Amino acid sequence: MVKYLVSKSLSLVCVVAASSVASAQNWVMPTPFGDRNQPTQIAYEFAEDV
């Protein structure tokens, strides 16, 4: 019984932690380059896709 309760409690904690991470709305992705530089453009595209 104790093993079952520990298992279910751990599952609940994992679900709550995963849902709070998944609900993040804004990403700040600083780049050391200007806005027109290719690495910055790639980073912008990546941030939009995610």
Image (cartoon, rainbow, N blue to C red):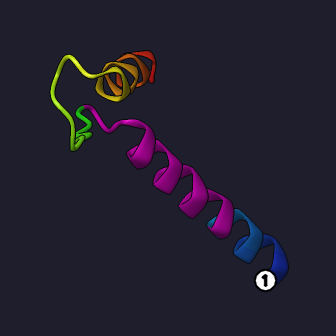
Q: Which quadrant would the C terminus be assigned to in this image?
A: top left
Q: Is residue 39 magenta?
A: no
Residue 43 position, x and y percent, is 36, 28
Say if 40 sits above or below 5 in the image. Answer: above
Q: Position of residue 25 (x, y in %)?
A: 26, 31
Viewer-side residue, 20 vs 44: 44
Residue at point 43%, 23% (across, down): 46
In the displayed structure, 4 sits above or below 36; it is: below
Q: Residue at x 83, y 79 (%)?
A: 3
Q: Nearer the viewer, residue 26 or 21?
A: 26
2 or 21, which lies in front?
A: 21
Which secondary structure is most common in the magenta stretch?
helix
**What segment carries the magenta color?**
10-25
Residue labelled with disc 1: 2
How many C-alpha atoms fall within 10 Å of the one at disc 1: few (<14), some, or many (≥20)? few
As helix, strand or loop, the secondary structure at mark 1 comes to helix
Horizontal side of residue 34 vs 44, given as left or right: left
Which of the 4 image quarters holds residue 35? top left
* Badge 1 amino acid: Val
What residue lies at 76% left-to-right and 69% top-to-bottom? 7
| Residue 27 location (% of width, % of height) | 26, 37
Q: Quadrant of residue 23?
A: top left
Q: How many numbered badges does the structure rendering display?
A: 1
Tell me the quadrant of the picture where the N terminus can be found.
bottom right
Q: Residue 12 magenta-drawn?
A: yes
Residue 17: percent from left, percent from top:
48, 56
